[in-house]
Every structure is written in C-alpha cells, then in structure tokens.
Image (cartoon, rainbow, N blue to C red):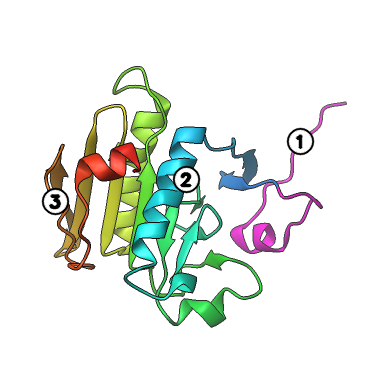
Amino acid sequence: MTYTPVKLTFAQYLEYDDGTDNRYELFDGELIPMPPESGVNGWITLWLRDKLVQLMKPQLIRVNVVELQVSGNPQNRYPDLVVLKEEHLTQIEKRQTITLDMAPPQLVVEVVSPYRSKKDENYQRDYIDKVHQYQERGIPEYWIVDPQAQVVIVLLLVGGSYQATKFFGNQRIVSQIFPEVDLTAAQVLEAK
C-alpha cells in the first residue's frame, strides 16, 4: 500500500496546527519544513531591527515571525525582517500571516544564507525567486543583505518593477520608504 500525502489549499494550511512551533512553506500543497536561521543571519536581523525601532513604532517591526502569502511556489514566505503597516497590527493578531487580500508590508529584508555559486539554492531563493514574488506582491521595498558578497541591495518598486541599487562598504544606504535611515552597508553587514 502506498501513502499519498493530502495536498493542502492555502486556506487549509492557515488552519493547520501540528502542535509544534515548526514553520513551513507550502509548495504544491505540501508542507516543507523551514530550517533554522544561521547565527550570523539572526544577529544581522536583530541588529537591524534595533536600529529601525529608533525610527518607528517598535511593534511594526517583526523578525522571523511574519508570514507572507505570495503567488507561485512556495505560496508563503517568512522574511527575516518585516516592517508592517499600521493596519496589519489588528489584522494579524490571531495569526501572523499577511494574506493576499491584505495590503503588502512596507519593507521586507532577507539576509542571504551562505552559497557556493549563483546556481546555489540559497542564492536563487533570495536573488531570483523572492524578487519575483515580492515584486508581484507589490512590496514597495525589499532589501537583500548579503554578508558573503559584502553588499546591501535595495530594491525599490517603481511602476510595478523593482529597481536595484547596490551599497558597499561605507556607502550610506538610501531608502525611499525610510529616508531617515542613517546606516552604511558596512554597518549592516558587520552588525556593529
């Protein structure tokens, strides 16, 4: 006898609870467990959160907990850092998921996990797959923080497409969404 896993719809997935704190991406209706973040990625994300809370309401900034419903596969993403809109605070009280019928967040940040080449899954996920999904989702600004390449890339949504600007070393990061951000690429990459 063979076992055929049940394919979940996104609505069924939202109701799913296996009694653990595990996080999953829904890919073609199947649950794919998410691995834990690396220490470097976690530290950079927390450091960046600490800097951003000085500029806005702290409850608008979430680290590794807000899930975004997106088009394509997987159908959901867990960005390393999300800056919510005020309206999200009440919408995600029950479950920290921003669904397609809700406004997109103001900003998402992904810290790229180590990769061997541009064909590596970690590179493809953050530089290719998420760019398309976040762009289609209408997220105004997406930051890619890549400790390996020593670059912070700010992707700004202009006319429905992302325009990328790369920041290296002591270049000050320019954010259209948060112009008051006063950080250099080196500060973010070194998280100090």
The residue lying toward the viewer, choosing from 59 and 34, is 59
* Residue 94 to residue 52: above or below: below
Indicate left or right for 25 with 179 as reference: right
Label 3 amino acid?
Answer: Arg
Q: How many marks?
A: 3
In the rendering, which numbered label is found on residue 73?
Answer: 2
The prevailing secondary structure element of the residues shown in magenta is loop
The magenta stretch spans which residues?
1-21
- The quadrant in which residue 128 appears is top left
Q: Choose top left, top right, bottom left or bottom right for residue 33.
A: top right
Horizontal arrangement in the rendering, residue 32 relative to residue 68 (left or right): right
**Location of mark 1 (residue):** 4
**Farthest residue, direction top:** 116
* Secondary structure beneath label 3: loop
- Secondary element at tag 1: loop
Q: Position of residue 59 (x, y in %)?
A: 49, 72
The amino acid type of the residue labelled 2 equals Asn
Q: Label 3 vs label 1: CA separation?
A: 52 Å
Tell me the quadrant of the picture where the N terminus can be found.
top right
Q: Position of residue 137 (x, y in %)?
A: 35, 61
In the image, residue 4 lies in the stretch drawn in magenta: yes
Disc 3 packing (10 Å; few <14; some 14–19; many ≥20): some
Badge nearest the viewer, 3 or 1: 3
Give the camera-side residue of 170 and 77.
Answer: 170
Label 1 or label 2, whichever lies nearer to me, is 2
**Residue drawn at (35%, 63%), measured in percent from left and top?**
52
Task: Determine which residue is flagged by label 3.
Answer: 172
Query: Where 76 falls versus 96 (above or below)?
Result: above
The amino acid type of the residue labelled 1 equals Thr
| Marks 2 & 3, CB-CB < 8 Å contact | no
Q: Residue at x 24, y 31 (%)?
A: 150
